[in-house]
Amino acid sequence: MDARGVLGRYGEDLAARLLTDAGMAVLERNWRCRAGEIDIVARDGDAVVVCEVKTRRSGAYEHPMAAVTPAKADRLRRLAELWLHAHGGPPPGGARIDLIGVIVPRRGAPVAEHVRGVA
């Protein structure tokens, strides 16, 4: 795994802990299909949450939240539909797409921001 992969994995581990600490249950990580990959699928009460995780080092050109373009949001919606179809359909609480942006500074603790319902 290269440095970028290690950074991404670190961000996903941090995001999974953040979701668990918020009372959600992580159902699956790095779910793949022909259309792409979902970083984290979690359950929040009776809703399914498809969570995209973006991790950047501090001082990076772009804030992690800026990485979700309209095209990326469309792809996440399609991936959510595929996951739901593969797992028996939407739950009573429906589904939503969340984004967790993680910034890792050169020194000190990482900063994670969780935005619900981005797409």
Image (cartoon, helix red, strand yellow):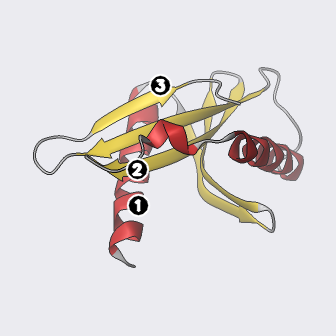
Q: Nearer the viewer, residue 80 or 4?
A: 4
Q: What x and y, as percent, mark residue 105?
A: 20, 46
Instruction: Work out whether 40 lies above or below 6.
Output: above
**Which of the marked residues, 3 or 1, is nearer the chain's N terminus?**
1
Identify the residue at image location x=11%, y=42%: 108
- Expressed as whole percent of the image width and height from the top left, the position of residue 8 reads 41, 59
Could you say where residue 57 lies in the image, as x and y percent from the top left? 29, 52
Which residue is label 2 attached to? 55
Q: Quadrant of the C terminus?
A: top right
Q: Is residue 99 above or below residue 76?
A: above
User: How busy is the neighbourhood of tag 3: few (under 14 within 10 Å), some, or many (20 plus)?
Assistant: few
The residue carrying mark 1 is: 9
Residue positioned 65% across, 24% down in the render: 117
Q: Are marks 2 and 3 in contact (CB under 8 Å)?
A: no
Of residue 78 and residue 62, the one placed in the foreground of this image is 62
Of callouts 2 and 3, the N-terminal one: 3
Task: Name the foreground residue: 117 vs 65.
Answer: 65
| Residue 99 sits in quarter | top right
C-alpha span from label 3 to label 1? 21 Å
